[in-house]
């Protein structure tokens, strides 16, 4: 039996169980302000909060008034609902408005194409959506339904979104993830110079066995090899700080080096290190 099947054993096996318990308590009870809970890492779907927060922060420093955030792979819709909640709070912190788009077929996973889609772990029909119920719950997000091979191709022209600042990738398959990467080939007006990405299926477990030669990791590697001025890069600072938080190992930052605003200064002013007496 996997230790994950025993919640108490899994918790007690944590290196810092008390700290994790306190964080969960603050998160579940909603103690303190959003900004405080964000800094403590005590938010549900913390990875969504992270990518949206930093996309909005960068937009504010570039004086971009509106951005888009995307979820590829909506499934039941819980993640999209949390994107809405986080976006509402983050708009209070930065002078930036946030558009939200959720991509999904609505009918569950398609049939795996080959070994790169991990057919030993995923099956056709997993994660089917109740479209009507989800639409009744959403307040602001736009559902983009259909085969992502088609919807990702037409998205920029059809919706003319604000510059994309954050993307969550959770389509599970290598093939589907490759199709979503079409949006990263778009023109400057649709892309932020740096885009914060969450890749859900990049760690896995003993049965799933994700690796660099299948799934999302392979899609990332192939994109980087085929593009000279657009790369998905590992934010090493994030993995060094509180490296026990699993979601931190699933973040990549898309760098568009050729973007006309990539080199715009966004850091602090008057940075000096005077000689001490």
Image: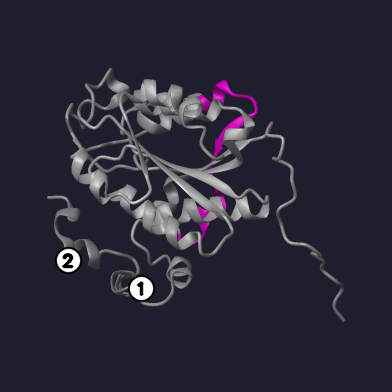
* Residue displayed at 39% across by 32% down: 216
The reply to whether residue 252 is in sight is no
Q: Residue furthest top?
A: 113
Q: The C terminus is located in which quarter?
A: bottom right
Task: Find numbered disc 2 in the image and state the secondary structure of the residue it sits on.
Answer: helix
Q: Which residue is mark 1?
A: 19
Relative to 115, say whether 16 is above or below: below
Q: Position of residue 187 (x, y in %)?
A: 61, 28
Local packing at callout 1 (Cα closer than 10 Å; few below 14, some 14-19, many 20+) is few
Q: Position of residue 34 (x, y in %)?
A: 44, 69
Q: Position of residue 273 (x, y in %)?
A: 82, 68
Numbered label attached to residue 8: 2
* Side of 165 relative to 203 (left or right): right
* Side of 161 relative to 7 (left or right): right
* Residue displayed at 48% across by 68% down: 39
Range drawn in magenta: 223-242
The reply to whether residue 146 is in sight is yes
* Residue displayed at 85% across by 71% down: 274
How far, Cα to Cα, is label 1 from label 2?
Answer: 15 Å
Task: Report the front residue among 185 and 150.
Answer: 150
Q: Are marks 1 and 2 in contact (CB under 8 Å)?
A: no
* Residue displayed at 37% across by 21% down: 149
Q: Residue furthest left?
A: 1
Comes first in the chain, label 1 or label 2? 2
Verify whether residue 156 appears in magenta.
Answer: no
Task: Find numbered disc 1 in the image and state the secondary structure of the residue it sits on.
Answer: helix
Verify whether residue 228 appears in magenta.
Answer: yes
Task: Report the front residue among 133 and 3.
Answer: 133
Q: Position of residue 2 (x, y in %)?
A: 16, 50
Q: Quadrant of residue 200?
A: top left
């Amino acid at each position: 039996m996997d230790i994950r099947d025993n919640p108490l054993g899994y918790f007690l096996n944590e290196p810092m169980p008390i700290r994790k318990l306190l964080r969960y308590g603050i998160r579940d009870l909603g103690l303190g302000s959003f900004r405080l809970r964000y800094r403590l890492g005590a938010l549900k779907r913390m990875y969504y909060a992270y990518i949206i927060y930093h996309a909005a922060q960068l937009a504010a420093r570039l004086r971009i008034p509106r951005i888009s955030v995307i979820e590829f792979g909506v499934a039941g819709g819980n993640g999209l609902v949390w994107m809405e909640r986080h976006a509402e709070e983050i708009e209070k912190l930065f002078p930036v408005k946030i558009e939200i788009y959720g991509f999904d077929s609505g009918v569950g996973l398609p049939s795996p194409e080959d070994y790169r889609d991990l057919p030993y772990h995923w099956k056709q029909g997993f994660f089917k959506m109740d479209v009507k119920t989800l639409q009744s719950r959403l307040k602001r997000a736009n559902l983009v339904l259909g085969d992502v091979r088609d919807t990702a191709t037409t998205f920029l022209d059809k919706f003319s979104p604000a510059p994309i600042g954050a993307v969550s990738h959770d389509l599970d398959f290598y093939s589907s993830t490759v199709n979503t990467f079409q949006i990263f080939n778009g023109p400057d007006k649709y892309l932020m110079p740096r885009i914060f990405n969450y890749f859900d299926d990049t760690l896995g477990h003993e049965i799933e066995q994700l690796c660099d030669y299948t799934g999302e990791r392979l899609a990332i590697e192939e994109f980087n090899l085929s593009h000279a001025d657009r790369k998905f890069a590992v934010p090493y600072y994030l993995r060094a700080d509180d490296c026990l938080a699993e979601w931190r190992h699933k973040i990549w930052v898309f760098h568009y080096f050729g973007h006309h605003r990539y080199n715009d200064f966004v850091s602090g002013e008057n940075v000096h290190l005077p000689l001490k007496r």
